[in-house]
Amino acid sequence: MIKLSKYVKTVVCSTDVALYNTMNHAVMKLPNEAIKDGAIIAELDEESFEILHDSYFFEDTDVTVASLLPSFLMNEKKLFISLELNLSCNLRCPYCYQTGTHDGKVISDEALDNLIDYVLAVNEKIKIEDLYVKILGGEPTLVWEKFMRVYNSLRKICDIHNIRFHLLVDTNGTRIEDLLTLDGYDSLLLTIPLSYKECHDKIRFDAKGNGTYDLILENVNVFHQKKPNDKIVIRYNVDDDNCGYFKDFLGDIATKLVFKPIVSVNYTAELTDTSNFKNSMTYLDFVEWSSSIAIDALIATEMPVTISPIISIEECQFRSRYSLKLFSDGTVGSCAMSFFDQTRLSIKDLVENFSKENEFAIKKSTQAIIADSQCMQCEDIFMCGGTNKLPCIKALNPDLCENKKANINLQHFITRYLDCVEMGKSDLFVVFENGESYR
Protein backbone atom coordinates (compact mmCIF):
# COMPACT_ATOMS: atom_id res chain seq x y z
CA MET A 1 0.00 0.00 0.00
CA ILE A 2 1.37 3.40 -1.03
CA LYS A 3 -0.12 6.51 0.54
CA LEU A 4 -0.96 9.24 -1.96
CA SER A 5 0.27 12.81 -1.58
CA LYS A 6 -2.07 15.15 0.24
CA TYR A 7 -1.97 17.33 -2.88
CA VAL A 8 -3.45 14.54 -5.02
CA LYS A 9 -7.24 14.41 -5.51
CA THR A 10 -9.13 11.27 -6.50
CA VAL A 11 -11.99 11.56 -8.97
CA VAL A 12 -14.16 8.52 -9.67
CA CYS A 13 -14.81 8.09 -13.40
CA SER A 14 -16.99 5.08 -14.20
CA THR A 15 -14.75 1.99 -13.79
CA ASP A 16 -11.60 4.06 -13.24
CA VAL A 17 -10.26 6.53 -10.74
CA ALA A 18 -8.49 9.64 -11.96
CA LEU A 19 -5.63 10.85 -9.78
CA TYR A 20 -5.21 14.59 -10.21
CA ASN A 21 -2.01 16.10 -8.86
CA THR A 22 -2.94 19.68 -8.03
CA MET A 23 0.72 20.68 -7.77
CA ASN A 24 1.80 19.90 -11.33
CA HIS A 25 -1.64 19.17 -12.90
CA ALA A 26 -0.70 15.66 -13.97
CA VAL A 27 -3.64 13.26 -14.35
CA MET A 28 -3.28 9.48 -14.05
CA LYS A 29 -6.01 6.83 -14.36
CA LEU A 30 -6.07 3.60 -12.38
CA PRO A 31 -8.77 0.93 -11.97
CA ASN A 32 -11.29 1.58 -9.20
CA GLU A 33 -10.09 -1.37 -7.20
CA ALA A 34 -6.52 -0.04 -7.16
CA ILE A 35 -7.41 2.86 -4.82
CA LYS A 36 -8.69 2.71 -1.26
CA ASP A 37 -8.72 5.32 1.52
CA GLY A 38 -6.25 7.64 -0.18
CA ALA A 39 -3.74 4.95 -1.03
CA ILE A 40 -2.78 2.72 -3.94
CA ILE A 41 -3.38 -0.86 -2.84
CA ALA A 42 -2.59 -2.53 -6.16
CA GLU A 43 0.91 -3.69 -7.00
CA LEU A 44 2.73 -1.33 -9.35
CA ASP A 45 5.41 -2.36 -11.79
CA GLU A 46 8.73 -0.59 -11.42
CA GLU A 47 8.16 1.78 -14.34
CA SER A 48 4.71 2.90 -13.11
CA PHE A 49 6.06 3.39 -9.59
CA GLU A 50 8.92 5.57 -10.82
CA ILE A 51 6.63 7.68 -13.02
CA LEU A 52 4.21 8.36 -10.18
CA HIS A 53 6.96 8.98 -7.66
CA ASP A 54 8.88 11.33 -9.95
CA SER A 55 5.61 13.18 -10.59
CA TYR A 56 5.09 13.76 -6.83
CA PHE A 57 2.05 11.50 -6.44
CA PHE A 58 3.21 9.86 -3.20
CA GLU A 59 3.10 11.04 0.39
CA ASP A 60 6.88 10.83 0.85
CA THR A 61 7.31 13.72 -1.62
CA ASP A 62 5.08 16.12 0.37
CA VAL A 63 7.98 17.48 2.40
CA THR A 64 9.83 18.38 -0.80
CA VAL A 65 6.77 20.05 -2.30
CA ALA A 66 6.14 22.03 0.91
CA SER A 67 9.72 23.32 0.87
CA LEU A 68 9.25 24.54 -2.71
CA LEU A 69 5.89 26.26 -2.15
CA PRO A 70 7.23 29.83 -2.33
CA SER A 71 8.75 29.17 -5.75
CA PHE A 72 5.48 27.63 -6.96
CA LEU A 73 3.25 30.43 -5.67
CA MET A 74 5.35 33.57 -6.07
CA ASN A 75 7.15 35.32 -8.90
CA GLU A 76 9.02 38.35 -7.63
CA LYS A 77 10.27 39.28 -11.09
CA LYS A 78 6.80 40.23 -12.30
CA LEU A 79 5.10 43.51 -11.47
CA PHE A 80 1.38 43.95 -12.03
CA ILE A 81 -0.11 47.45 -12.10
CA SER A 82 -3.80 48.24 -12.50
CA LEU A 83 -4.39 51.82 -13.52
CA GLU A 84 -7.79 53.49 -13.22
CA LEU A 85 -7.54 56.50 -15.52
CA ASN A 86 -11.02 57.85 -14.93
CA LEU A 87 -14.45 57.18 -13.47
CA SER A 88 -16.39 58.56 -16.40
CA CYS A 89 -18.03 56.07 -18.76
CA ASN A 90 -20.26 56.23 -21.83
CA LEU A 91 -22.31 53.26 -20.52
CA ARG A 92 -24.59 53.00 -17.50
CA CYS A 93 -24.36 49.35 -16.43
CA PRO A 94 -26.39 48.96 -13.21
CA TYR A 95 -24.19 46.23 -11.70
CA CYS A 96 -20.93 48.20 -12.02
CA TYR A 97 -19.23 48.65 -8.64
CA GLN A 98 -18.44 52.20 -9.74
CA THR A 99 -22.10 52.98 -10.37
CA GLY A 100 -23.05 56.49 -9.30
CA THR A 101 -19.45 57.73 -9.59
CA HIS A 102 -19.50 58.89 -13.21
CA ASP A 103 -18.40 62.35 -12.14
CA GLY A 104 -15.78 63.05 -14.80
CA LYS A 105 -12.87 62.55 -12.40
CA VAL A 106 -9.63 61.95 -14.30
CA ILE A 107 -6.24 60.99 -12.93
CA SER A 108 -3.71 63.82 -12.66
CA ASP A 109 -0.45 64.04 -14.59
CA GLU A 110 1.36 64.23 -11.27
CA ALA A 111 -0.08 60.88 -10.19
CA LEU A 112 0.97 59.31 -13.50
CA ASP A 113 4.49 60.71 -13.09
CA ASN A 114 4.57 59.29 -9.56
CA LEU A 115 3.58 55.90 -10.95
CA ILE A 116 6.54 56.03 -13.34
CA ASP A 117 8.81 56.80 -10.39
CA TYR A 118 7.30 53.89 -8.49
CA VAL A 119 7.97 51.40 -11.30
CA LEU A 120 11.56 52.65 -11.53
CA ALA A 121 12.01 52.25 -7.77
CA VAL A 122 10.64 48.70 -7.83
CA ASN A 123 12.85 47.80 -10.78
CA GLU A 124 15.92 49.07 -8.93
CA LYS A 125 14.91 46.86 -6.00
CA ILE A 126 14.03 43.59 -7.75
CA LYS A 127 15.01 43.90 -11.44
CA ILE A 128 11.62 43.38 -13.10
CA GLU A 129 11.47 40.93 -15.98
CA ASP A 130 7.79 41.37 -16.89
CA LEU A 131 5.61 44.43 -16.39
CA TYR A 132 1.86 43.84 -16.68
CA VAL A 133 -0.15 47.02 -16.95
CA LYS A 134 -3.94 46.82 -16.92
CA ILE A 135 -5.51 50.11 -17.97
CA LEU A 136 -9.16 50.64 -17.13
CA GLY A 137 -11.70 53.22 -16.04
CA GLY A 138 -14.59 54.04 -16.16
CA GLU A 139 -13.94 53.70 -19.86
CA PRO A 140 -10.22 54.42 -20.47
CA THR A 141 -10.60 55.29 -24.15
CA LEU A 142 -12.51 58.44 -23.13
CA VAL A 143 -9.27 59.98 -21.82
CA TRP A 144 -6.89 58.95 -24.56
CA GLU A 145 -4.35 61.69 -23.90
CA LYS A 146 -3.86 60.33 -20.36
CA PHE A 147 -3.73 56.79 -21.74
CA MET A 148 -0.91 57.62 -24.13
CA ARG A 149 0.98 59.69 -21.57
CA VAL A 150 1.44 56.75 -19.22
CA TYR A 151 1.63 54.18 -22.00
CA ASN A 152 4.56 55.88 -23.74
CA SER A 153 6.38 56.47 -20.46
CA LEU A 154 6.08 52.86 -19.31
CA ARG A 155 7.00 51.48 -22.70
CA LYS A 156 10.14 53.66 -22.68
CA ILE A 157 11.12 52.33 -19.24
CA CYS A 158 10.70 48.77 -20.48
CA ASP A 159 12.81 49.43 -23.56
CA ILE A 160 15.62 50.99 -21.52
CA HIS A 161 15.69 48.33 -18.81
CA ASN A 162 14.97 45.30 -21.01
CA ILE A 163 11.61 44.57 -19.37
CA ARG A 164 8.88 42.74 -21.27
CA PHE A 165 5.86 45.04 -21.54
CA HIS A 166 2.44 43.39 -21.38
CA LEU A 167 -0.56 45.64 -21.91
CA LEU A 168 -4.06 44.70 -20.78
CA VAL A 169 -7.01 46.99 -21.42
CA ASP A 170 -10.44 46.66 -19.84
CA THR A 171 -12.82 48.37 -22.25
CA ASN A 172 -16.53 48.19 -22.95
CA GLY A 173 -15.71 47.72 -26.64
CA THR A 174 -17.79 50.61 -27.97
CA ARG A 175 -14.74 52.72 -28.93
CA ILE A 176 -11.79 51.02 -30.64
CA GLU A 177 -10.33 53.59 -33.06
CA ASP A 178 -7.59 54.77 -30.70
CA LEU A 179 -6.81 51.26 -29.47
CA LEU A 180 -5.98 50.29 -33.05
CA THR A 181 -3.07 52.79 -33.04
CA LEU A 182 -1.18 51.06 -30.20
CA ASP A 183 2.14 49.38 -30.93
CA GLY A 184 5.51 48.60 -29.36
CA TYR A 185 4.27 46.17 -26.69
CA ASP A 186 5.24 42.55 -26.13
CA SER A 187 1.62 41.46 -25.75
CA LEU A 188 -1.80 43.08 -25.81
CA LEU A 189 -5.00 41.66 -24.38
CA LEU A 190 -8.38 43.37 -24.52
CA THR A 191 -11.11 42.33 -22.10
CA ILE A 192 -14.60 43.21 -23.33
CA PRO A 193 -17.83 42.31 -21.48
CA LEU A 194 -20.49 40.73 -23.66
CA SER A 195 -23.37 38.36 -22.97
CA TYR A 196 -26.52 37.04 -24.67
CA LYS A 197 -27.92 39.89 -26.78
CA GLU A 198 -31.29 40.29 -25.06
CA CYS A 199 -29.70 40.17 -21.59
CA HIS A 200 -26.71 42.29 -22.60
CA ASP A 201 -28.75 45.14 -24.04
CA LYS A 202 -30.88 45.28 -20.89
CA ILE A 203 -27.92 46.04 -18.62
CA ARG A 204 -25.09 47.32 -20.84
CA PHE A 205 -26.62 50.36 -22.45
CA ASP A 206 -25.41 53.86 -23.20
CA ALA A 207 -26.54 57.12 -21.63
CA LYS A 208 -29.51 57.22 -24.03
CA GLY A 209 -30.63 53.71 -23.11
CA ASN A 210 -29.44 52.08 -26.35
CA GLY A 211 -28.12 48.51 -26.17
CA THR A 212 -24.53 47.93 -27.31
CA TYR A 213 -24.38 44.25 -28.32
CA ASP A 214 -24.31 44.71 -32.09
CA LEU A 215 -21.87 47.63 -31.94
CA ILE A 216 -19.42 45.67 -29.79
CA LEU A 217 -19.53 42.61 -32.07
CA GLU A 218 -18.80 44.82 -35.06
CA ASN A 219 -15.88 46.46 -33.26
CA VAL A 220 -14.45 43.14 -32.11
CA ASN A 221 -14.38 41.95 -35.71
CA VAL A 222 -12.67 45.12 -36.89
CA PHE A 223 -10.05 44.95 -34.16
CA HIS A 224 -9.23 41.32 -34.89
CA GLN A 225 -8.97 41.92 -38.63
CA LYS A 226 -6.54 44.81 -38.10
CA LYS A 227 -4.62 43.25 -35.18
CA PRO A 228 -4.96 39.47 -35.63
CA ASN A 229 -2.05 38.61 -33.33
CA ASP A 230 -3.49 40.34 -30.28
CA LYS A 231 -5.87 38.62 -27.90
CA ILE A 232 -9.46 39.53 -27.20
CA VAL A 233 -11.20 38.04 -24.19
CA ILE A 234 -14.99 38.16 -24.20
CA ARG A 235 -16.03 38.34 -20.54
CA TYR A 236 -19.44 36.78 -19.98
CA ASN A 237 -20.59 38.31 -16.69
CA VAL A 238 -22.89 35.59 -15.36
CA ASP A 239 -26.14 36.17 -13.49
CA ASP A 240 -29.46 34.40 -13.02
CA ASP A 241 -30.87 36.11 -16.12
CA ASN A 242 -28.26 35.12 -18.70
CA CYS A 243 -26.86 31.81 -17.37
CA GLY A 244 -29.42 29.79 -19.31
CA TYR A 245 -28.50 31.41 -22.62
CA PHE A 246 -24.76 30.76 -22.61
CA LYS A 247 -24.79 28.10 -25.32
CA ASP A 248 -27.08 30.24 -27.49
CA PHE A 249 -24.66 33.14 -27.00
CA LEU A 250 -21.70 31.02 -28.08
CA GLY A 251 -23.61 29.90 -31.15
CA ASP A 252 -24.46 33.48 -32.04
CA ILE A 253 -20.93 34.86 -31.77
CA ALA A 254 -19.61 31.81 -33.64
CA THR A 255 -21.66 32.88 -36.66
CA LYS A 256 -21.10 36.63 -36.33
CA LEU A 257 -17.40 36.85 -35.45
CA VAL A 258 -14.73 36.25 -38.07
CA PHE A 259 -12.54 34.38 -35.59
CA LYS A 260 -12.84 32.07 -32.59
CA PRO A 261 -12.64 34.26 -29.49
CA ILE A 262 -11.56 33.46 -25.96
CA VAL A 263 -14.63 33.50 -23.71
CA SER A 264 -14.18 33.88 -19.97
CA VAL A 265 -17.06 33.38 -17.53
CA ASN A 266 -17.16 35.62 -14.45
CA TYR A 267 -19.57 35.86 -11.55
CA THR A 268 -21.52 39.12 -11.43
CA ALA A 269 -21.32 40.26 -7.82
CA GLU A 270 -23.58 42.77 -6.13
CA LEU A 271 -20.92 45.06 -4.70
CA THR A 272 -23.13 48.14 -4.47
CA ASP A 273 -26.45 48.89 -2.80
CA THR A 274 -28.14 49.72 -6.08
CA SER A 275 -31.69 48.44 -6.42
CA ASN A 276 -31.37 48.43 -10.22
CA PHE A 277 -29.56 45.09 -10.34
CA LYS A 278 -29.93 41.87 -8.36
CA ASN A 279 -28.28 38.52 -9.02
CA SER A 280 -30.14 35.64 -7.38
CA MET A 281 -27.44 33.19 -8.53
CA THR A 282 -25.08 32.53 -5.61
CA TYR A 283 -21.33 32.21 -6.08
CA LEU A 284 -21.52 28.50 -5.30
CA ASP A 285 -24.25 28.14 -7.93
CA PHE A 286 -21.88 29.84 -10.35
CA VAL A 287 -19.06 27.42 -9.50
CA GLU A 288 -21.32 24.47 -10.28
CA TRP A 289 -22.61 26.11 -13.46
CA SER A 290 -19.18 27.04 -14.81
CA SER A 291 -17.74 23.60 -14.00
CA SER A 292 -20.42 21.74 -15.92
CA ILE A 293 -22.92 23.60 -18.10
CA ALA A 294 -20.45 26.25 -19.22
CA ILE A 295 -17.71 23.74 -20.02
CA ASP A 296 -20.18 21.56 -21.93
CA ALA A 297 -21.29 24.57 -23.98
CA LEU A 298 -17.71 25.59 -24.79
CA ILE A 299 -16.81 22.05 -25.83
CA ALA A 300 -19.95 21.70 -27.96
CA THR A 301 -19.10 24.89 -29.86
CA GLU A 302 -15.35 24.06 -29.84
CA MET A 303 -14.48 27.28 -28.06
CA PRO A 304 -11.36 27.48 -25.83
CA VAL A 305 -12.09 26.35 -22.27
CA THR A 306 -10.60 28.91 -19.91
CA ILE A 307 -12.31 27.34 -16.87
CA SER A 308 -9.72 25.41 -14.90
CA PRO A 309 -8.59 24.34 -11.41
CA ILE A 310 -5.23 25.98 -12.11
CA ILE A 311 -4.69 29.08 -10.02
CA SER A 312 -3.47 32.23 -11.77
CA ILE A 313 -0.04 31.82 -13.31
CA GLU A 314 0.87 35.39 -12.47
CA GLU A 315 0.83 35.94 -8.74
CA CYS A 316 -2.37 37.62 -7.57
CA GLN A 317 -2.10 41.41 -7.53
CA PHE A 318 -3.51 41.52 -4.00
CA ARG A 319 -0.85 39.12 -2.72
CA SER A 320 2.14 40.35 -4.74
CA ARG A 321 4.54 42.47 -2.71
CA TYR A 322 4.90 45.45 -5.04
CA SER A 323 1.88 45.13 -7.34
CA LEU A 324 -0.89 47.66 -6.84
CA LYS A 325 -3.87 49.48 -8.23
CA LEU A 326 -3.61 53.21 -8.80
CA PHE A 327 -6.99 54.92 -8.58
CA SER A 328 -8.04 58.00 -10.50
CA ASP A 329 -7.85 60.15 -7.34
CA GLY A 330 -4.12 59.41 -7.04
CA THR A 331 -4.40 56.86 -4.23
CA VAL A 332 -3.21 53.26 -4.24
CA GLY A 333 -4.69 49.98 -3.11
CA SER A 334 -3.86 46.30 -3.31
CA CYS A 335 -6.49 45.56 -5.96
CA ALA A 336 -9.90 46.60 -7.28
CA MET A 337 -11.57 45.82 -3.96
CA SER A 338 -9.59 48.69 -2.42
CA PHE A 339 -12.16 50.89 -4.18
CA PHE A 340 -14.22 50.55 -1.00
CA ASP A 341 -11.31 51.46 1.30
CA GLN A 342 -11.56 55.05 2.51
CA THR A 343 -8.03 55.16 3.96
CA ARG A 344 -5.89 54.68 0.88
CA LEU A 345 -2.35 56.05 0.72
CA SER A 346 -1.47 58.46 -2.10
CA ILE A 347 0.95 57.33 -4.80
CA LYS A 348 3.02 60.43 -4.03
CA ASP A 349 3.46 59.42 -0.38
CA LEU A 350 4.23 55.86 -1.39
CA VAL A 351 7.01 56.94 -3.73
CA GLU A 352 8.49 59.41 -1.26
CA ASN A 353 8.57 56.73 1.45
CA PHE A 354 9.40 53.78 -0.79
CA SER A 355 12.61 52.91 1.03
CA LYS A 356 11.00 53.31 4.43
CA GLU A 357 8.46 51.26 6.35
CA ASN A 358 5.13 52.67 5.15
CA GLU A 359 1.58 51.53 5.80
CA PHE A 360 1.06 50.20 2.28
CA ALA A 361 4.19 48.04 2.39
CA ILE A 362 3.27 46.75 5.85
CA LYS A 363 -0.19 45.79 4.66
CA LYS A 364 1.23 44.10 1.58
CA SER A 365 3.62 41.99 3.66
CA THR A 366 0.70 40.56 5.64
CA GLN A 367 -1.23 39.79 2.43
CA ALA A 368 1.52 37.66 0.90
CA ILE A 369 0.47 34.03 0.58
CA ILE A 370 3.62 32.82 2.36
CA ALA A 371 2.65 34.96 5.37
CA ASP A 372 -0.46 32.81 5.88
CA SER A 373 0.57 29.63 7.69
CA GLN A 374 -2.92 28.15 7.38
CA CYS A 375 -2.83 28.48 3.59
CA MET A 376 0.73 27.19 3.30
CA GLN A 377 -0.15 24.01 5.21
CA CYS A 378 -3.45 23.40 3.42
CA GLU A 379 -3.79 20.40 1.11
CA ASP A 380 -5.83 22.56 -1.26
CA ILE A 381 -3.21 25.28 -1.67
CA PHE A 382 -2.78 24.53 -5.39
CA MET A 383 -6.55 24.41 -5.94
CA CYS A 384 -7.14 27.73 -4.24
CA GLY A 385 -3.85 29.60 -3.97
CA GLY A 386 -5.31 31.47 -1.04
CA THR A 387 -8.05 33.00 -3.18
CA ASN A 388 -10.76 32.09 -0.66
CA LYS A 389 -9.23 34.68 1.65
CA LEU A 390 -9.10 37.43 -0.94
CA PRO A 391 -11.48 40.34 -0.33
CA CYS A 392 -13.26 39.79 -3.66
CA ILE A 393 -14.12 36.19 -2.74
CA LYS A 394 -14.82 36.82 0.93
CA ALA A 395 -17.35 39.43 -0.16
CA LEU A 396 -19.27 36.65 -1.93
CA ASN A 397 -19.21 33.92 0.71
CA PRO A 398 -17.11 34.03 3.89
CA ASP A 399 -17.35 30.26 4.47
CA LEU A 400 -15.65 29.02 1.29
CA CYS A 401 -12.38 28.27 3.05
CA GLU A 402 -13.95 26.57 6.04
CA ASN A 403 -16.15 24.43 3.78
CA LYS A 404 -13.25 23.50 1.49
CA LYS A 405 -14.91 24.98 -1.57
CA ALA A 406 -12.65 25.84 -4.50
CA ASN A 407 -13.25 27.81 -7.67
CA ILE A 408 -14.36 24.71 -9.53
CA ASN A 409 -16.21 21.41 -9.07
CA LEU A 410 -13.28 19.06 -9.66
CA GLN A 411 -15.48 16.02 -10.31
CA HIS A 412 -17.25 17.85 -13.15
CA PHE A 413 -14.05 19.30 -14.57
CA ILE A 414 -11.83 16.20 -14.60
CA THR A 415 -14.62 14.04 -16.01
CA ARG A 416 -15.18 16.40 -18.93
CA TYR A 417 -11.46 16.88 -19.49
CA LEU A 418 -10.80 13.13 -19.71
CA ASP A 419 -13.74 12.72 -22.09
CA CYS A 420 -12.10 15.29 -24.37
CA VAL A 421 -8.73 13.55 -24.07
CA GLU A 422 -10.36 10.38 -25.42
CA MET A 423 -11.98 12.38 -28.26
CA GLY A 424 -8.68 14.07 -29.14
CA LYS A 425 -9.98 17.48 -28.07
CA SER A 426 -7.87 18.15 -24.99
CA ASP A 427 -6.31 21.14 -26.75
CA LEU A 428 -9.60 23.00 -26.12
CA PHE A 429 -8.57 23.23 -22.45
CA VAL A 430 -6.15 26.08 -23.08
CA VAL A 431 -5.43 26.89 -19.43
CA PHE A 432 -5.23 23.33 -18.14
CA GLU A 433 -3.23 22.01 -21.10
CA ASN A 434 -0.98 24.97 -21.88
CA GLY A 435 -0.88 27.01 -18.69
CA GLU A 436 -2.14 30.10 -20.51
CA SER A 437 -3.56 32.89 -18.37
CA TYR A 438 -6.34 35.28 -19.31
CA ARG A 439 -6.86 38.11 -16.84
Image (cartoon, helix red, strand yellow):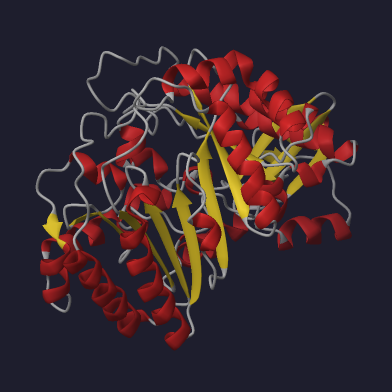
Which quadrant of the rendered structure holds the N terminus? top right
Residue 235: x and y, percent?
Answer: 53, 36
Measuring from the top left, give residue 112's x and y in whole percent.
24, 66
- Vertical placement of residue 159 versus 174, above or below: below
For this orientation, the residue located farthest to the bottom is 160
Residue 219 is at least partly visible in this image:
yes
Q: Is residue 439 above or below residue 320?
A: above
Q: Residue at x 50, y 12 (%)?
A: 241
Residue ID at (59%, 21%) = 196
Q: Quadrant of residue 295?
A: top right
Q: Nearer the viewer, residue 1 or 152?
A: 152
User: Seen in the image, is 374 located left or right of residue 174?
Assistant: left
- Name the one closer to the observer, 190 or 214: 214
Q: Is residue 285 left or right of residue 47?
A: left
187, above or below 269, in the image? below
Q: Is residue 34 visible?
A: no
Would you place residue 349 above or below residue 29 in this image? below
**Residue visible at 37% across and 31% down in the picture:** 91
* Residue 67 percent across, percent down from the top left: 48, 66
